Image (cartoon, helix red, strand yellow):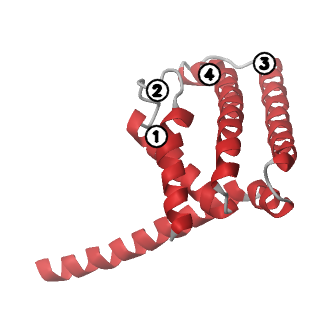
Amino acid sequence: MKRTISIFSLVVVLGPFLMAQPNMDMPEKGGSKRGKKEREMMMMFRLTEELDLTTKQGEKFFPRFREHREALDAIRKEINAVGEPMKAKLDNKDDIDKGDIKKAVNHINNLKKKKADIEADFILKMDDILSPEQQIKLAFFTQKMVKDIKKEMKGRRSGMGNMRRHNKKKRW
């Protein structure tokens, strides 16, 4: 119980400081400021749980994690920027040069490699904070979180489906 309270306290106290980013007041494409903050807080909570972080580890881990996320966000934005001219050409039904396609694909591929290198470097440099077991869990955290969220969504959908069928029967 004490551990749960300390984890929750850590997330509540450090959360606003760790989530402070420029342009947070601007809604993203397909999302809002509030939604992004909620997703980030959920990720922090799940990381704390999954890695079984102590308070001391959390105090050292999350500032580095925030820097890491910012670096990945910059690469994500750059990948999107590379694709924008191609998307505009498609939308305008302009001719697309094969050389432009090759250049864009190679650029995106290089950025994805850079992103993978940043991920690996981050995990390996966490050895001064995390145990080897925690580093392994961190390496597979994103995949596990996505899998868990898909399960949760599937469970919600199947529950909603049963509810919808039940409601239809009542209406007629």
Q: Nearer the viewer, mark 4 or mark 2?
A: 2
Residue for point 54% across, 26% down: 21
**Nearer the observer, 10 or 93:** 10
Name the amino acid type tagged 4.
Glu
Q: Dot 4: what SS? A: helix
- The amino acid on which the numbered mark 2 sits, given as a three-letter code, is Met
- Residue identifier under label 2: 24
Q: Is residue 155 left or right of residue 125?
A: left
Earlier-in-chain disc, 4 versus 2: 2
Residue, disc 1:
37
Vertical arrangement, residue 103 with respect to residue 1, above or below: above
Gap in angstroms between the C-alphas marked 2 and 3:
33 Å
Q: Nearer the viewer, mark 2 or mark 3?
A: 2
Mark on residue 100? 3
Nearer-the-camera pick, 93 or 160: 160
Q: Amino acid at mark 1?
A: Lys
Real-space Cα distance between discs 4 and 2?
22 Å
* Kind of element beneath mark 1: helix
* Picture coordinates of residue 49, whole percent (x, y): 61, 62
In the visual, does 51 lie left or right of 19? Answer: right
Answer whether labels 4 and 2 touch (C-beta < 8 Å). no
Is the residue marked by circle 3 packed among few (<14), some (14-19), or many (20+) residues within 10 Å?
A: few
Distance (Cα) linking label 1 and label 3: 37 Å
- 145 is higher (above) or lower (below) than 14: below
Residue 91 versus residue 1 in the image, above or below: above
Residue 150 shows up from this direction = no
Asked whether 15 or 169 is in front, the reply is: 15
Horizontal arrangement in the rendering, residue 171 relative to residue 79 (left or right) = left
> Which is nearer the N-term, disc 2 or disc 3?
2
| Labels 4 & 1 near each other (Cβ < 8 A) | no
The residue carrying mark 4 is 84
